[in-house]
Image (spheres, rainbow, N blue to C red):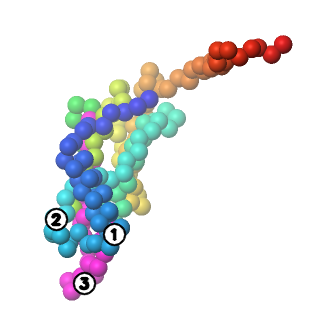
Amino acid sequence: MGFLEKWSPSTDLERLRHEFDDLLEHFGFDRGEFKAWPAASSRPAIESSIDGDKFVVRVDLPGVNAKNIDVQVVNGILTVKGTREEKRESDKASVYRREIRYGSFERSISLPEGIKADDLKAVHRDGMLELSAPLPKAAAPASVKIQVEEKKPEGQKKAA
């Protein structure tokens, strides 16, 4: 059972920018040497699954405080957005290497048919946001065994 993800050109461009940053870093360049781009939206890793009789979505949000997370459902689209704040031990500290992405983030996925927004429960623990809702009985996955037929290439004789 697959789920559709809302397409956003800006998030694809942001991913390309991050990949380009990684490429420059691989060859020993710091992106700051070329242009100081402001921190922009980032795409946290997301996983959705059916776990028994529950629909579960996990969003990887290390370093994000629960108060900075906003979860909404509009027209069957679940959206998780928020902000990862930069923390420095001292105002005098300068960043030598940056791999942690700060700033705003947003991810959206379509909920399976029958999942009710009011039934979603959200728990934030150890940098992971987990949303879950009971799966409607009609939406429970059914396993169907499909027989695989082996077809021999033409021209081969059957063994006697």
Name the residue furthest bottom: 92
Return the disc, 2 or 1, that comes first in the chain's sequence.
1
Give the residue drawn at x 35%, y 67%.
26
**59, 131: nearer the viewer:** 59
**63, 16: nearer the viewer:** 16
The residue identified by callout 1 is: 27
- What kind of residue is marked 3? Ala
Q: Secondary structure at mark 2?
A: loop
Position of the C terminus by quadrant: top right
Name the residue furthest right: 160
The percent position of residue 140, horizontal first and vertical second, equals: 48, 26
The percent position of residue 44, horizontal first and vertical second, equals: 32, 53
The residue identified by callout 3 is: 93
- What kind of residue is marked 2? Trp
Q: Report whether residue 67 is seen.
A: no
Name the residue furthest front: 155
- What kind of residue is marked 1? Phe
Q: Which residues are magenta?
A: 77-102
The residue identified by callout 2 is: 37
